[in-house]
């Protein structure tokens, strides 16, 4: 990731919350964020018969999480997978797609090889989108409050309707545990 990107992602997340009048320490509604960005959200079953999606999933399980389409008329549509096993997974996939939109990443190139379609994926942009999605769902001020309260990743996941992996990842990588320990040391 580019130097300074992590701090920039926290700033973007907090600016968007400000624009949406969502408090820094409140839970984010990802669909509300999509509306704020002017992105319409559709479940893939509205576009493709459910049987097709199930067949695709049988061929390659989990091959499709979510995708964003930039239509010729300028509108942006994020499509989520109805076969996602949990709402938390659906929300984090959607947050990932919205992160691409926020970061103005160029839409993925579509390559065809015979009957197969491939989305070209840029590993650096994927990493950035993952990181920003984490900041959007669990911004640092929120994590800091949880760390001070001594909440576990399971509890943070439950309160925010995110996956436990996401909660653990953000708690560990945002540096809030370290910050809480430092302040505690100052007072004792
Ligand atoms: Zn992506």
Image (spheres, rainbow, N blue to C red):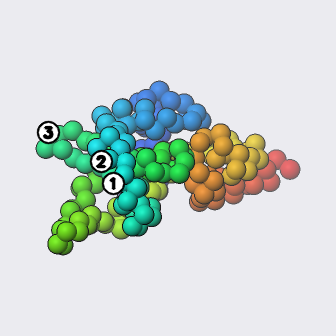
| Coordinates of residue 107 in the picture (x, y in percent) | 24, 55
Q: Residues within 10 Å of mark 3 (few under 14, many from 20)?
A: few
Q: Nearer the viewer, residue 5 or 165?
A: 165
Q: Which residue is mark 1?
A: 52
CB under 8 Å between callouts 2 and 1? yes
- Badge 2 local density, few (<14 within 10 Å), some, or many (20+)? few
Q: Residue 134: x percent and y percent?
A: 51, 51
The mark closer to the camera, 3 or 2, is 2
Mark earlier in primary sequence (3, 2)? 2
Residue pushed farthest right? 188
The answer to which of 152 and 52 lies nearer the viewer is 52
In the rendering, which numbered label is found on residue 28? none
Question: Where does residue 136 sit, x and y in percent of width and height?
Answer: 48, 44
Residue ID at (17%, 72%)? 114
Other-residue count near label 1 (Cα within 10 Å), few / some / many at <14 / 14–19 / ≥20: few
Mark 3 in CB contact with mark 2 (< 8 angstroms): no
Residue where numbered disc 3 is placed: 73
**Regarding mark 3 in the picture, which secondary structure is present there?**
loop
Left or right: where does residue 175 sit relative to residue 69? right
Question: Is any atom of residue 96 visible in this view?
Answer: no
Q: Identify the residue shown where x is 64% and y is 56%.
A: 168
- Disc 3 residue: CB within 8 Å of ligand 1: no
Residue to which mark 2 is pinned = 48
Badge 2 element: loop
Q: How many angstroms separate mark 2 from mark 1 (CA)?
A: 7 Å
């Amino acid at each position: 990731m580019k130097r300074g990107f992590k701090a920039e992602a926290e700033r973007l997340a907090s600016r968007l919350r400000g624009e949406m009048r969502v408090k820094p320490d409140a839970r984010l509604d990802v669909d509300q964020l999509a509306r704020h960005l002017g992105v319409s959200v559709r479940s893939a079953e509205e576009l493709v018969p459910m049987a097709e999606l199930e067949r695709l999933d049988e061929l390659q399980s989990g091959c499709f999480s979510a995708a964003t389409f930039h239509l010729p008329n300028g509108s942006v549509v994020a499509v989520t997978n109805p076969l996602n096993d949990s709402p938390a997974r659906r929300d984090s996939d959607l947050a990932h797609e919205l992160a691409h939109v926020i970061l103005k990443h160029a839409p993925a190139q579509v390559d065809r090889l015979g009957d197969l379609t491939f989305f070209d994926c840029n590993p650096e942009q994927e990493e950035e989108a993952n990181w920003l999605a984490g900041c959007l769902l669990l911004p640092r001020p929120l994590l800091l409050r949880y760390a001070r309260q001594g909440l576990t990743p399971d509890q943070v996941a439950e309160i925010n309707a995110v996956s436990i992996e996401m909660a653990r990842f953000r708690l560990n990588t945002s540096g809030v545990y370290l910050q809480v320990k430092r302040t505690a040391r100052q007072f004792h």
